[in-house]
């Protein structure tokens, strides 16, 4: 079977951009993206544009438009976000069997790990984003939960036979034990799902011209607010406590942070580990994935995953991070 992007050629990319009235200079640069395909396209006498071609059959049109509407809503409230460009009131387009969107080019640097001043400012940015996100729910996008990020992830890995046979009993055992703990944790901890970025790692909050801006809302979904905060924390426990304090101080200038969500952090980290493995497995028929993740089929990777899941089991027994 051909993979979803087998017919997405540079000529098709140029034709798609020019179908919206732009005149390209025929320069196409593929950017680092696996889930979708993203290109920088040169425009005659203008700044290059970013063309994002959505993976077929992943999101519905309604879900993609909801992502775009969320970006526009944030921009309307002056939250610095890279929102898609409009043409005649539309942001989602089709060409050659592919859905795509165009974005202004906006570069920048990822935050410096552990930089307290930057964490305070990132907290302000996330607080502003969540104040808007909490105002109403998504209608067409899923909610981050143990079922879809945990149980479904494990099912994909087991049904597809991706775990080496020699490590299968150990992986399945620790994964099932961990999922039982996560079911209990998410049932016990009260939280109100809000609209989130969903994949808020430092590479999606970029710094340029003394300001931060949000990029790549492709994974936005409903979930606990702390999902967009915990990936900003790094280092030993005492370091993460100080970082969390700065992050939340900035956050609470614009939106109340529910400290009761803090016990979810290690559970969310565990779900991200399992979901990432399942994501690679589900995309393995795309030739870009074996090339980018050649270690995925080896025993070493799965041995490391068993260790990582065991460490998450232990982390769930530790005292959660807290605010002073």
Image (tube, rainbow, N blue to C red):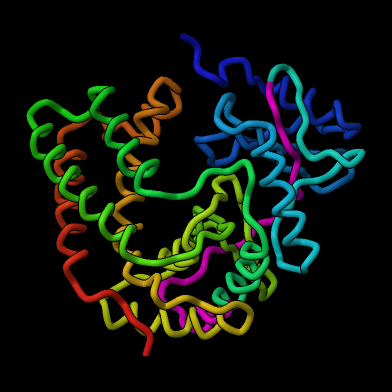
Residue 259 is situated, as x and y percent measured from the top left of the image, at: 42, 78
* Magenta stretch holds residue 241: no
Residue 252 or residue 119, whichever sits in front: 252
The C terminus sits in image quarter: bottom left
Q: Is residue 110 above or below residue 57?
A: below
State which region is magenta.
98-121
Residue 266 or residue 13, whichever sits in front: 266
Report which quarter residue 292 is drawn in. Answer: top left
Residue shown at the point (28%, 60%) measured from the top left: 185
* Magenta stretch holds residue 111: yes
Residue shown at the point (12%, 32%) measured from the top left: 168
Residue 70 is situated, as x and y percent measured from the top left of the image, at: 70, 53
Q: Is residue 232 above or below residue 303?
A: below
Residue 318 is situated, as x and y percent measured from the top left of the image, at: 18, 72
Residue 308 or residue 140, whichever sits in front: 140
Report which quarter residue 251 is drawn in. Answer: bottom right
């Amino acid at each position: 079977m051909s993979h979803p992007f087998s017919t997405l050629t540079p000529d098709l990319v140029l034709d798609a951009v020019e179908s919206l009235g732009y005149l390209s200079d025929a320069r196409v640069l593929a950017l680092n993206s696996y889930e979708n395909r993203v290109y920088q396209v040169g425009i005659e006498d203008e700044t290059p544009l970013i063309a994002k071609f959505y993976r077929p059959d992943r999101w519905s049109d309604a879900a993609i438009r909801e992502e775009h509407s969320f970006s526009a809503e944030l921009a309307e409230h002056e939250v610095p976000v890279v929102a898609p460009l409009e043409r005649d009131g539309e942001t989602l387009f089709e060409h050659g069997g592919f859905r795509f969107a165009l974005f202004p080019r906006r570069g920048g640097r990822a935050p410096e790990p552990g930089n307290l001043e930057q964490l305070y400012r990132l907290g302000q940015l996330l607080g502003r984003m969540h104040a808007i996100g909490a105002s109403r729910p998504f209608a067409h996008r899923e909610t981050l939960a143990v079922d879809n990020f945990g149980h479904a992830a494990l099912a994909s890995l087991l049904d597809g036979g991706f775990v080496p046979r020699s490590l299968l009993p150990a992986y399945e055992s620790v994964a099932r034990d961990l999922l039982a703990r996560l079911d209990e944790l998410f049932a016990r901890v009260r939280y109100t799902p809000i609209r989130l970025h969903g994949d808020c790692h430092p590479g999606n909050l970029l710094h340029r011209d003394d300001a931060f801006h949000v990029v790549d809302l492709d994974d936005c979904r409903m979930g606990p607010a702390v999902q967009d905060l915990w990936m900003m924390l790094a280092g030993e426990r005492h370091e993460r406590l100080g970082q969390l304090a700065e992050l939340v101080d900035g956050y609470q200038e614009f939106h109340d942070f529910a400290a009761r969500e803090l016990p979810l952090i290690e559970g969310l980290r565990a779900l991200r580990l399992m979901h990432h493995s399942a994501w690679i497995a589900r995309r393995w028929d795309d030739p870009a994935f074996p090339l980018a993740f050649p270690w995925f089929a080896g025993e070493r990777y799965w041995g490391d995953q068993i260790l990582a899941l065991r460490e998450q089991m232990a982390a769930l027994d530790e005292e959660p991070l807290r605010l002073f």
